[in-house]
Amino acid sequence: MNTTTRQELLAAFDMLMQPGRFKDYGPNGLQVEGKTQVCRMVSGVTASLALIEAAIDAQADAIFVHHGLFWRGQDGRVTGWMKQRLALLLAHDISLFAYHLPLDAHPELGNNAQLGLRLGLSASSCFGEQSLGFLGGRSDGGSFATAGDLARHIENTLKRPVTQVGPVHAAIKKIAWCSGGAQGYFEPAIAAGADAFITGEISEPQVHVAREMGVTFIACGHHASERYGAPAVASHVAAQFGLHHQFIDIDNPA
Ligand SMILES: [Zn+2]
């Protein structure tokens, strides 16, 4: 097994993720500085205490996540859960790398691309703010006979129930999707001509918009829709340096 430096790892992640292209809600890149040499890396969706503990058990030198520790709107105090997570990272000298929107957007390794891959969907264009939404359809060129068929296909693939609103019997050809809490992309998806929109979360207003506009909305879980980008990016970069990499999925029903 090889090692590399934290700095080389950061440069490789930045090269791939191009964080400068995005206006984001928190800092992308190295969020917590650990030891200089990195040999073992763990990836996960969120830098939760459970993930940090699992990474320590796995003897990780670095953690790569989609949801890091720092977000706009936090009051900046290191108390409670923040103290616990930071204390463990610092005590074990583990680096935390986090990429938010750049990890959603990467055309092959990102959350949207990897979710599409699992669901058998290919994008032909992007839509919405910062072009984060993907628009396309089934990779085989086919369509779903009904929106209910699409919903069942997603449930079978992601192994969890989904929330579906809007027309159940409509045929679905043009599909838009955006991972995570992207319910705000529903109206841009409708404007782009989608028959159905898939994201992680749903809020109250989307139910009415789906019914009134006759467009299907499917919420398949924030976590479930963002489970695939972090391991894809981390394993890609780990392979570049010959590092050990392991994805640890901390179950999350939301
Ligand atoms: Zn997210």
Image (spheres, grey):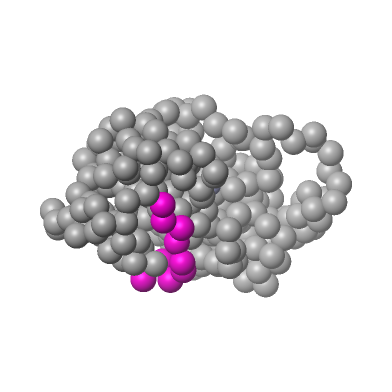
Highlighted range, magenta: 156-165
**Residue 65 place in picture, x, y as percent:** 56, 52
> Which image quarter: residue 252?
bottom right
**Residue 221 place in picture, x, y as percent:** 50, 57
In the rendered structure, the answer to whether residue 40 lies left or right of residue 135 reads right
Q: Tell whether position 84 is magenta.
A: no
Residue drawn at (54%, 44%), measured in percent from left and top? 203
Instruction: Give 241 or 172, whichever is nearer the viewer.
Output: 172
**Residue 101 place in picture, x, y as percent:** 49, 38
**Residue 8 place in picture, x, y as percent:** 51, 44
- Residue that sits furthest to the left in the current view: 141
Residue drawn at (69%, 65%), measured in percent from left and top? 50
- Residue that sits furthest to the front in the current view: 212
Instruction: Give 216 or 79, whichever is nearer the viewer.
Output: 216
Say whether residue 211 is visible: yes
Instruction: Give 203 or 140, whichever is nearer the viewer.
Output: 203
Q: Split into 4 quadrants, where in the image is the C terminus?
A: bottom right
Instruction: Give 128 or 216, whichever is nearer the viewer.
Output: 216
Residue drawn at (55%, 66%), measured in percent from left and top? 249
Residue drawn at (34%, 37%), measured in percent from left and top? 213
In the rendered structure, the answer to whether residue 37 lies left or right of residue 138 reads right
Q: How many marks?
A: 0
Say whether residue 123 is visible: no
